[in-house]
Structures are given as structure tokens and as C-alpha cells.
Amino acid sequence: MHAIPVEEYPGYDIFCMIICLILMQIVVGCGLPQVALLEQPQKLSRVHASDDPEQPELPPTVIAFAFPDNDTNIIGYAIFYKIYYSLADPDIRNDERDFDENSYIGTNNEMQPGDAILRERGFLKLGEYGKSEFEEYYIGHDGSQEAVYIAFNPSGATNADRRKQPVIGYDYPVNNGVKVLARGFIDPRDGSENTETNPGNKFRSFVNDWEYDVDDPDGYHDGDLRRGYNLLGYQPGWKIEDIERCGIPYFLRRPKTLPDGTSVGIMPGKTLRIGFAVYSYGRIPGSLKPITSKPVYVGEVGYPDLHDKNREL
């Protein structure tokens, strides 16, 4: 019995081509993972043309971002914030660097999507006022609109005691807020009922709700007013020890007059800077696997004449 020469075997060339293609797919599949990303939202410095064709500049108390052109698979946007002690806070410059894609050089040093950078830099997720859990909190992607606006002082009040809670919505001005925002911080020692004057075991308010203990520094319990990057992993439900070890309290850095008349402390300024970052959030079609964009720093607001409900500033 004689063997048939390989070159005479019918369909041999096609068979080899199929095998090669299969091997190529296996090799590629075993290489570096191919990460699918959603398109990033875009920072707005002016009112979106869909809300006002004249596109006036946004006031300093409003942060906004536009929906990306390619919004396929986008469910919504996860929004984070961070408190800066003053315009001279060195974290502002460091954060600007980490949100700049040009600062990442090399295939092994790419800007990470989702909340990786946000967690590393100490940003906290926004909460919803009156809630005590984040759940899957995001602002939904409304296909009928083009942008999202955060009105940090919707009443326009100059008196800190008369400010209204910040709201977020799709149109400008934000007349019908989609959500009322709260700081993503819960005092783990406060088990009291949530009331109009005391948030209790709920997310802290952005308005007139900054707490500290001037007599006992270890009793300081407002995570936003301490500098620490390990906070997010314990929130909500931090232990007291987690908060106590997170640096010098903001209020205790202010000048304080001692009984002998001397003054101690550092004056960082009466305006807190609150920076905001956002990324697109969605799911891979036909799967429950989440997918995100790279984060975008969309700006900051100044909170002048900061008041604390336990202290006259």
C-alpha cells in the first residue's frame, strides 16, 4: 500500500491555513489581556449648547460634563470627590498629574480605568442625601440629554447657614435635581436617628455639617477633613482607629488662642476646595461583567466661609 504524497492530498492547503489561524488565535489569546474601555465623558467649562445656544460660562459653584459621542453600552457615570485644604494643597498638583494621560509613558505604565486612581489618590464616592449605603450609585445616562450639571450652591446664598444641599441634574440651570448629593462619609460612632439637624448614621451633608472635637484630637470623626488614602476601603462602616490615624485635622490646623493669650496653629484659609472626577460605567453586551472608561477630572468648587455646626468660624 503506497502513501499518498502530501502535495497531492486534496484540500491540504486549506487545512493548513485553518490550523494556522487557530494557532494564531491561541497565541494572541494567551498574550496581554485586551481591555475594552468605554469612552470618557468630557469636562465642560461652559453651558452645553443643547441647554443654551449662547453657551455662557458656568459659575464657579457648578461642575459639569458632557456625554461622550459614542455612548454605546454606557449605563451611567460614577462620580467621586475629594476635599482639598486650600489652593496651596500639594495634593492638587499631584492629582492633576495622575489624571493626565500624558504623564503615563510605556505599555506597562498606562492610565488605569475605573476607580483605581481615585482610590489611590483618596477620592470618595458621592452619596445620596438621606442614604446610608452606596449600593450601585451613579447618575444614569439619559439618552435624551447631552450633559450633567452639579449645582453646588443651587440657592446662590452667600450666607453659609442658608445654603441648600447640592443637587445634580441633566439640564441647566438645575431646576429639577435628579439627586441630592451627600459626602461619602459616615461617622461610625453615630448611631442616632437621622433628623433635619443631625444626619445620624447617614452620609454627611455638604452644608453646615463638618464635625471635629477641638478638646480631644482623638475624638475627631470627620474623614473628609483628615488626609488619608486608606479611608475609602473602610467606608461606609469605618472603625474609629481608621479615622484617628489619618493625619492632622483640618480645623485643628487653624489658629487657636490659648488661655495665656498665645496663638497656635496654621491658617490654611477659610475656603475648602472640593474636586470632582467621573468615569463612564456600563456592562459588556450579553454579560454582567462591568466595563468603565478612564476617569476624568472635571473641576472643583470653592466652599467659602466654611461653617461647622459645633464651632463659630
Image: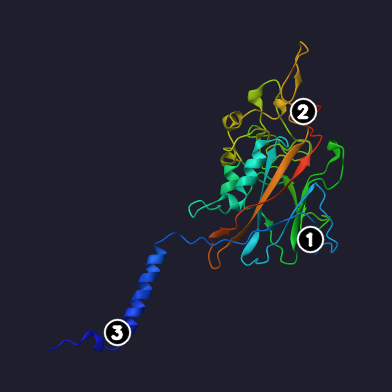
Q: Would residue 24 be found to the left or right of residue 47 on screen?
A: left
Residue at 69% of width from left, 47% of height from top?
Answer: 276
- Give the distance between the C-alpha atoms of the residues marked 1 and 3, in whole angstroms: 61 Å
Residue placed most toward the observer, 58 or 73: 58
Disc tally is 3
Mark 1, secondary structure of its residue: loop
**Where, by quadrant of the figure, is residue 172 drawn?**
bottom right
Instruction: Indicate the amino acid at tag 2.
Output: Asn
For the residue carrying disc 2, how many other residues have a C-alpha within 10 Å: few (<14), some (14-19), or many (20+)? few
- Image quadrant for the N terminus? bottom left
- Image quadrant for the C terminus? top right
**Where 284 sits versus 307, above or below?**
below
- Give the distance between the C-alpha atoms of the residues marked 2 and 3, in whole angstroms: 85 Å
What's the mark number on residue 48?
1
Q: Residue furthest left?
A: 1
Residue identified by numbered label 2 = 310
Residue placed most toward the observer, 160 or 253: 253
Mark 3, secondary structure of its residue: helix
**Where 46 sits versus 268, above or below?**
below
Residue placed most toward the observer, 276 or 210: 276
